[in-house]
Amino acid sequence: MRTEQLEYIAAVTRLGSLRRAAEELRLSQPALSETVRNLERELGVGLLERRRSGSTMSAQGRELLPHIVGVLEALDRLRAAAGEQHRISRMLRVGTVNAATVPLLVPVLRDFRATHPVTQVEVVGAQQAEIQRALSEGGFDLGLVNQLDGDDVPAGLEAVRLLCGRPVVCVHPGSPLASRPSVTVEELLREPLVGMRSGYVMHRFARRLLAGRSPVFSYSTDGAEMGKLMVAEGLGATVLPDFSVIGDPLERLGRITYRPIADDSTRVLLMLQRRKGDSVPQSAQALHRAFVDRARELNGASGALSSTA
């Protein structure tokens, strides 16, 4: 068994396909495939499920992945102890629906970088279902998703609640809605609406809030960040969790503002999810703790967090 075999299978898992892994590793796809097959024969386990649409990690492969990553991290520690200057850094992948980016995600990444200078972190914006699928398959280490009260955590994942907020109407300061102390559904229907695409929790909430009625005009976009930019340019209003708006640079600069929704008491929960498992890479554990610690600071009390599985 060779070290590069383990690194190759970790790359296939992280990137989600043999093709993308071959491109990153600068190998031909047949050469990479043969290397993985040799490792499978040596271990006596099928690590990949091969389909016409591409190859993904098998269930047996996902069970072995923490051990593979553990071996690679142990080799990293050995290289560091031996004084090697060009050791391979580990990569962590975080999927996010782009919620609480400024108050939570950015400070966590900044602090994590200071304590783990050689661990790379890749942040990937995606819809909730995509994040949860990648977590289950081992493609993401952690996922930040929104959830409404009563939503279930998918089987095979565990979650901790980081933030609890309320939906608000995010508007341009020049909008007529900005002069209201709160915004009613009827008032919201009279404004162009920048909505999230199907697959986002806030899309589901907006449909429920409007009860099947359509606004005067609507846009559809991916994620809170693009929604806020469109609002700042005066294209309309959007409905987001308050923790995705309060303190945002556009809000601090006076380009956007927000108002509560009249007669609505819905809670939006920001959840940190990961795959269940006994063996988790130390760097992933450290990043998970960093998110939890930052959330406790924002909540102002350690008892504000709760775990679900």
Image (cartoon, rainbow, N blue to C red):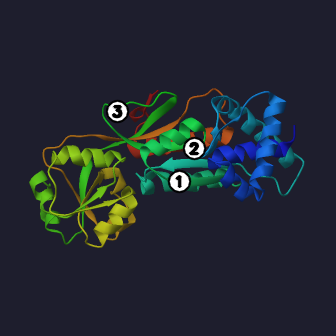
**Alpha-carbon neighbours of circle 1 within 10 Å: few (<14), some, or many (≥20)?**
some
Q: Is residue 64 above or below residue 207?
A: above
The secondary element bearing badge 2 is classed as: loop
Tell me which amino acid carries mark 2: Phe
Q: Mark 2 = which residue?
A: 140
Residue 13 as seen in the image, left or right of residue 180: right
Report how far apart the C-alphas of labels 2 and 3 lie in the structure.
21 Å
Residue 13 as seen in the image, left or right of residue 171: right
Tell me which amino acid carries mark 3: Asp
| Residue 136 can be seen in this image | yes
Q: Residue 65 falls in which quadrant of the image?
A: top right
Q: Residue furthest right?
A: 82
Residue 135 as seen in the image, left or right of residue 35: left
Q: Mark 1 = which residue?
A: 124
Q: Which mark is residue 191?
A: none
Work out whether mark 3 precedes mark 1 in sequence or the reverse, and give the earlier one: 1
Tell me which amino acid carries mark 1: Val
Q: Of residues 307 and 40, which is closer to you in this image?
A: 40
Work out whether mark 2 precedes mark 3 in sequence or the reverse, and give the earlier one: 2
Question: What residue is shown at x 56% (from left), y 29% (from top)?
Answer: 276
Work out whether mark 2 precedes mark 1 in sequence or the reverse, and give the earlier one: 1
- The picture places residue 248, in percent across and down from the top left corner, at 37, 61
Q: Is residue 118 above or below residue 211?
A: below
Q: Mark 3 = which residue?
A: 151
**Alpha-carbon neighbours of circle 3 within 10 Å: few (<14), some, or many (≥20)?**
few
Question: What residue is shown at x 55% (from left), y 35% (from top)?
Answer: 136
Is the Cβ of the residue at disc 2 closer than 8 Å to that at disc 1? yes
